[in-house]
């Protein structure tokens, strides 16, 4: 092992290194996604020595922007997008997507930006006693994150005709729709494939909005670097260890060690618990890895008589909170044509006919503010096992969402609607749309997706109820912080990137002050000792 | 199988290597399913199997993705291909492996899986159909059949405005070419 990271670049490709390393810094950050990148930038800007270790590869934006969706899925999505939460009881199998690259899941977002709703903050403060996580306390963090990510309302002229159709339906039914805010500044061209990276480079994912500032302020980032253990010394975190992943087959190559008084785990909701379990945490409260919420989502595809050509426009541009009290958020959504084609029902000629009707189709989605019945545990391999037991209330919400979406489609003049019920024939009128809500089917026939796993290492005001305190430090191991989706104390009912980044910003600011204070104390102590020696 | 790959996919393999994640048997099962999923009818209503290029591209992607994923995924797909192969007797009453069914029977079998009232059976089909169809419909005649009017799924939309749309720009439907 060398005493320095043996490469000159700020972002070092771990797979290219011929040897491991053993280095020292102020803060070691595990994971370079939404949470990790914010911490890296803010701590480096505050003058602290930062090393970020990322398991996934580093791909420059000018390279990934040219990729087709299947290339992005294979190279940037964890498990090539094939990850599933196993449904327990009356629960759909939920497909889970996560990023695994420098920039993490931030590379794959639809760009949608929400703050945590006021009522959720209120619940945290009033019912959970988390006074430090009030809306006012997070205000400066929200502002900072939104400024750097260039969050703007999507202008009406960027709406696709797919979205316009659902707006028409919503209007007819008296459902109020609002423009979505996204982190695309004024640069979005409406290529409608953000989840597979933006060919126009419009989306301000953290690899372009935060990490460049981190490296400009001296942070080092090592890709293809899997952290396996937190080093513990004298009862506190003292760094991390792991190994580089060599070559495309990601086999283990050289070992590395990063020694630091402060460690931030930002591996994401499904992977942070694995690192914490290995460090022996989670025993005191028994809460680690439990209560995972997912925001399960469904969508419908509606076929119209006239051409829609829904791929011209921003991927997501409007939403509705009309059913907020039912825990349902309606969101406009589209995707790349090959991805939409793959989701059409049928086999053989029936499937091909439906794919040919895509230019006449519009799509719209809904997401559930779920109670959270997810459990994440280590498996014999690298990836976690995730079970999810859906609350009966949430299953009803999913059914109700499909009903509302189908009603909107028919109110806009749709000929037929393909719901998320696998293998079900398309529904052809409003009555059948309404009957969806009462449909008695195996829950596993509902095709469900989730993009926002949260809450596996919750923040709490008491070590018996959670894993970290309100400033992200673990109750059980001083010096070990968590700054990613896992610390959210409940489901939030909105897209999670800005909330996670804002929580991470607060943690980084506080930690930055703490390290500055520790450094000042150390300097004073050294000065005193020196003066004493001189006087002697 | 690699002779059927498009230039984009070949370039991707040259850059990132190929590591097989499915056994040759499992690849054959996936290919046979894909041939039926992508099957179409000619002008006279006769069944024609999915194109060899699209099927090969899709199976290779699945195998390669499994090869670069965890052992959970490789084990899972090994098991799923085995189930896919063995269920025709229970779904359509034909005592044969899926790969040995005629194209028409394979379509009938896979349709029975998709429309089954047991969600796990629908999921079995979905586990192959969705990821492989994403790849199949990404290029060539399959992409054209979606009506997509750009040269590739990685192409940018051509806008009439040079930079940001002006505030009074027309609705996208009228404002793009
Ligand atoms: C397809 C998709 C669409 C989305 N759309 C939106 C949207 O429109 N709006 C929105 O607000 N949110 C969206 N999200 C959610 C948002 O991206 C995530 O909530 C957010 O990025 C999570 O941040 P995180 O820091 O918790 O984890 P991540 O961003 O996932 O980062 C975790 C990183 O840690 C790395 N890592 C894990 N374990 C280790 C280890 N042991 N050693 C080293 N590295 C490790 C991972 O490889 C990963 O890069 C979307 C997500 C997806 C997948
Ligand atoms: S809609 Fe298109 S241009 Fe806009 S951010 Fe998404 S991919 Fe980029």
Image: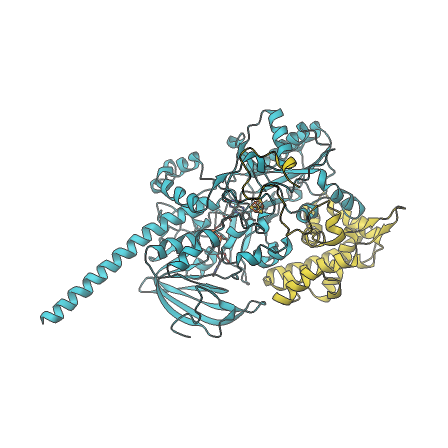
* Location of residue A524 in the rendering, given as x and y in whole percent from the top left corner: 19, 61
Using residue A204 as the reference point, say whether residue A527 is left or right of it: left
With respect to residue A390, does A207 lie above or below?
below
With respect to residue B109, does A316 lie above or below?
above
With respect to residue A220, does B112 lie above or below?
above
- Between residue B83 and residue B37, name the one nearer to us: B37
Chain B painted colour: yellow
Q: Is residue A96 visible?
A: no
* Location of residue B47 in the rendering, given as x and y in whole percent from the top left corner: 86, 50
Chain drawn in cyan: A
Image quadrant in which the N terminus of chain A is located:
bottom left
Name the residue rendered at 79%, 50% in the picture.
Answer: B109
Work out which residue is located at the far left of the displayed protein and give it: A535
* Location of residue A172 in the rendering, given as x and y in whole percent from the top left corner: 62, 25
Q: Is residue A299 visible?
A: yes
- Between residue B116 and residue A112, name the one nearer to us: A112
Using residue A113 as the reference point, say whether residue A313 is left or right of it: right
């Amino acid at each position: 092992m060398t005493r320095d990271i043996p490469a000159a670049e700020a972002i070092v490709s771990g797979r290219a290194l011929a040897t491991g390393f053993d280095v020292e810094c102020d803060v070691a950050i595990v994971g370079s996604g939404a949470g990790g990148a914010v911490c890296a930038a803010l701590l480096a800007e505050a003058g602290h020595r930062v090393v970020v270790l990322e398991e996934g590869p580093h791909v420059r934006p000018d390279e990934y922007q040219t990729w087709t969706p299947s290339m992005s899925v294979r190279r940037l999505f964890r498990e090539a997008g094939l990850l599933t939460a196993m449904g327990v009881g009356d629960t759909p199998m939920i497909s889970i997507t996560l990023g695994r690259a420098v920039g993490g899941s931030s590379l794959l977002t639809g760009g949608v930006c929400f703050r945590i709703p006021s009522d959720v903050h209120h619940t945290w403060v009033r019912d959970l006693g988390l006074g430090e996580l009030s809306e006012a306390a997070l205000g400066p963090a929200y502002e900072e994150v939104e400024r750097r990510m260039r969050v703007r309302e999507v202008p009406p002229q960027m709406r696709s005709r797919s979205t316009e159709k659902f707006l028409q339906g919503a209007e007819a039914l008296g459902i109020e729709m609002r423009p979505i805010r996204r982190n695309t500044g004024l640069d979005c061209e409406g290529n409608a494939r953000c989840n597979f990276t933006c060919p126009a480079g419009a989306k301000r994912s953290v690899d372009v909005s935060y990490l460049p500032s981190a490296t400009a302020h001296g942070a080092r980032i090592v890709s293809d670097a899997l952290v396996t253990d937190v080093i513990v010394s004298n009862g506190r975190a003292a760094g991390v260890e792991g190994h580089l992943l060599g070559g495309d087959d990601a086999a283990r190559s050289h070992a590395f060690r990063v020694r630091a008084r402060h460690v931030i785990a930002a591996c994401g909701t499904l992977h942070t618990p694995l690192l914490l379990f290995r460090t022996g945490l989670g025993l005191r409260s028994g809460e680690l890895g439990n209560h995972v919420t997912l925001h399960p989502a469904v969508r419908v595809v509606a076929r119209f008589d006239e051409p829609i050509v829904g791929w011209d426009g921003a991927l997501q541009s409007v939403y509705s909170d009309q059913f907020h009290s039912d825990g349902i958020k309606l969101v406009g959504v589209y995707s790349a044509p090959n991805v939409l084609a793959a989701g059409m029902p049928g086999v053989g000629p029936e499937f091909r006919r439906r794919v040919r009707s895509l230019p006449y189709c519009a799509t719209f989605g809904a997401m559930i503010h779920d109670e959270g019945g997810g459990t994440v545990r280590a498996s014999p391999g690298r990836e976690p096992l995730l079970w999810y037991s859906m609350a009966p209330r949430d299953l009803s919400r999913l059914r109700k969402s499909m009903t509302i979406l189908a009603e909107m489609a028919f109110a806009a003049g749709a000929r037929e609607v393909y719901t998320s019920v696998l293998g079900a024939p398309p529904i052809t009128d409003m009555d059948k749309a309404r009957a969806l809500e009462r449909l008695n089917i195996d829950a596993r026939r509902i095709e469900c997706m989730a993009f926002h796993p949260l809450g596996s290492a919750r923040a709490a005001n008491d070590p018996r109820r959670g894993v970290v305190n309100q400033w992200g430090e673990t109750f059980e191991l001083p010096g070990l912080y968590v700054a990613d989706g896992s610390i959210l104390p409940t489901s939030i009912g909105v897209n999670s990137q800005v909330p996670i980044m804002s929580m991470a910003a607060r943690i980084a600011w506080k930690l930055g002050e703490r390290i500055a204070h520790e450094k000042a104390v150390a300097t004073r102590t050294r000065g005193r000792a020196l003066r004493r020696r001189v006087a002697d | 199988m690699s002779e059927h790959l498009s230039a984009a996919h070949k370039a991707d393999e040259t850059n990132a290597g190929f590591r097989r994640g499915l056994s040759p048997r499992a690849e054959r099962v996936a290919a046979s399913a894909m041939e039926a999923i992508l099957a179409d009818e000619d002008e006279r209503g006769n069944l024609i199997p999915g194109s060899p290029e699209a099927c090969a591209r899709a199976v290779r992607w699945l195998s390669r993705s499994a090869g670069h994923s965890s052992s959970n995924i490789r084990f899972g797909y090994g098991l799923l291909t085995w189930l896919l192969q063995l269920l025709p007797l229970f779904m359509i009453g034909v005592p044969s492996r899926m790969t040995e069914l005629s194209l028409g029977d394979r379509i009938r079998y896979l349709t029975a899986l998709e429309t089954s009232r047991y969600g796990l059976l629908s999921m079995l089909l979905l586990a192959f159909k969705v990821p492989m169809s994403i790849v199949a419909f990404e290029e060539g005649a399959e992409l054209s059949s979606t009506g997509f009017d750009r040269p590739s799924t990685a192409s940018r939309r051509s806008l009439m405005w040079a930079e940001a749309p002006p505030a009074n720009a027309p609705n996208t439907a009228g404002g793009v070419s």
